[in-house]
Amino acid sequence: MMRQNLFSPRKLVRKFTPAMRPLPAVPYGAVQMPVKTGETLGRIGSLEVRMARNFKEVKKAQRLRYEVFYEEMSAVADAQTLATRRDADPFDAYCDHLLVVDHASLKRNKLGRLKPEIVGTYRVLRQDVADRHGGFYTSAEYDIQSLIDANPGKRFMELGRSCVLKPYRNKKTIELLWHGLWSYILRHKIDVMLGCASIEGTNPDAMADQLGFLHHNSLAPEEWRVRAIENRFVDMNRRPAADINQKEALRALPPLIKGYLRLGAFVGEGAVIDHQFGTTDVLIVMPVSELNTRYVNYYGADASRYAS
């Protein structure tokens, strides 16, 4: 029996992604220098967002990722990952690592020194760096090179490995992470963000409403559309829009994906099952020119809201 939808999909998307207006030119000239290793990008109380200072801090971020992805969620660890208790791959060596650290929670390192705890992280990879090291991580799941080739004058950046320690999953920590990202985007004059976001589980039929909601309401327009590579393509259009309870499907989406939608993100065509991490991935594409002005204004066109 067809379910009656009392909520318009378009209205729901507008609720979570308020109507966009033309974005004013970002004043790149207001911030001249690129982000430096270890530079503080913002602060709220005891929480600070900054770039990792050294490989020791990257290893701590990898341990945080292990705790979230492997211990809390359902990622399957290989022998190396189990032995080190770190979520690590070759991309970590040349990506930049955005960190949220809590100066009120101090942990002793191996030398007995007290250091602020790392409670959140984002891994970012700029196109110029990716080009020197074999490309983006996302290219193993989506044909993003076609989009890059179609936009030769634009700077792309990949987002990935986002996670926050469970006690810190609150508005303050998430806002600080996004403030750090926005600062980074301005400093490096990024034009387009992309990356995979995950829905927990590997059975696409069990998440048909969520995938269908994204397909019917957030599919990227042709000029920004990217398709999952053929041997991993999973159809997201698993149910007619009229059969989906739009409100419930939206509520069931992971907070990170809903956050991207609020910012004005699109999704790619087709999902990809990641058996190692126990997830079904969707591609997120966010042109900076399409970002919702509400959020740009909130953090400041010069990323000044939480500047320290």
Image (cartoon, rainbow, N blue to C red):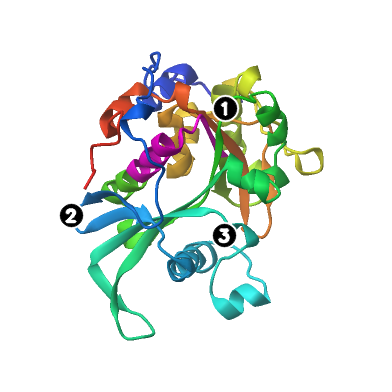
Residue furthest to the top:
22
Horizontal and vertical percent position of residue 246: 49, 27
Of residues 269 and 122, which is closer to you in this image?
Answer: 122
Name the secondary structure under disc 2.
loop
Verify CB contact (< 8 Å) between mark 2 and mark 1. Answer: no
Residue annotated with mark 2: 45
Name the secondary structure under disc 3.
helix
Horizontal arrangement in the rendering, residue 118 relative to residue 8 (left or right): left
Mark 1 is surrounded, within 10 Å at the Cα level, by few (under 14), some (14 to 19) or many (20 or more) other residues, namely some
Q: Which of marks 2 and 1 is nearer the N terminus?
A: 2
Q: Which residue is drawn at 44% across and 20% down?
A: 6
Image height of 241 relative to 298, above or below: above
What kind of secondary structure does the magenta stretch mostly adopt?
Answer: helix
Horizontal and vertical percent position of residue 158: 56, 42
Residue annotated with mark 1: 154
Residue numbers of the magenta segment: 178-194
Mark 2 is surrounded, within 10 Å at the Cα level, by few (under 14), some (14 to 19) or many (20 or more) other residues, namely few
Horizontal arrangement in the rendering, residue 308 relative to residue 35 (left or right): left
Mark 2: which amino acid?
Gly
Of residues 120 and 253, which is closer to you in this image?
Answer: 120
Mark 3: which amino acid?
Asp
